[in-house]
Amino acid sequence: MIEILAATTNRGKVREIEKLFTPSLIQVKLYFLPDFNIMVDCPEAGETFLENAAAKSLFYGKFVPHLYTVGDDSGLVVEALDGGPGIYSSRYSGPDATDEKNIVKLLEQLKGIENRKAKFVTAVCLSRNGQIIKTFTGEVEGIIIDEKRGSGGFGYDPVFFYPPLKKTFAQLSTEEKNRISHRARAFQKLKDFLESSKEFSF
């Protein structure tokens, strides 16, 4: 069995990851930060999603060097905004940012702009005992619409329209989202790596 610390306080995110590893060719035991009473914030000073994911993985890995640690970072990349909000997605509207405020600012920035191409990106980093083992990324492309649709999800999901399913991410079922989301794609790559690596085949 491989024991992994997911560098998050969000048990919902841990459940998402657990679903991806069921079924799996390997046995995985997942922990999250509260399991070890880790309540400190990781300083995010990276300039890319991968840098932030690596920073989280290495930072929290120091508390449990005997475990593998997975850090991740996600955000929205909008073509017409030169890649913004990018790594600042969660705090786009300022220090008191909320999902609603972030969406309002995003739509204001895109007012009058025809190009609405965007993508969600997730970066994942696997490390152990201060050493980065492997990094992974997942992306999903869509367009930003002017009105919110759907009540599910979080963040920019209500205005992120996914053409293949003709729905916003906030309108997707949990099963649909877990099948095509950027986070699911990144963690699927992690799962594939663990299953194919001899280091973990025990």
Image (cartoon, rainbow, N blue to C red):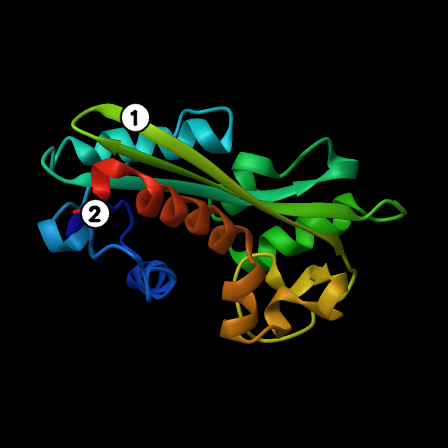
Q: Kindly check if marks 1 and 2 are in contact, taking CB atoms under 8 A apart as contact.
A: no
Image coordinates for residue 27, horizontal then vertical, percent: 21, 57
Image position, residue 102 (x, y; %): 60, 51
Q: Is residue 41 visible?
A: no
Residue at horizontal 31 percent and vertical 36 percent from the top: 126
Disc 1 is placed on an element classified as strand
Residue 12 visible in rendering: yes
* Residue 111 vertical placement versus 79 (above, below): below
Q: Name the residue at 40% across, 47% down.
A: 192
Q: Which residue matches tag 2? A: 4
Q: Which amino acid does label 1 sit on?
A: Ile
Residue drawn at point x = 21 percent, y = 46 percent? 5
Query: Is residue 45 rendered to the left or right of residue 157?
Result: left
State the mark number for residue 132: 1
5 in relation to 176, above or below: above
3 on left or right of 183 = left
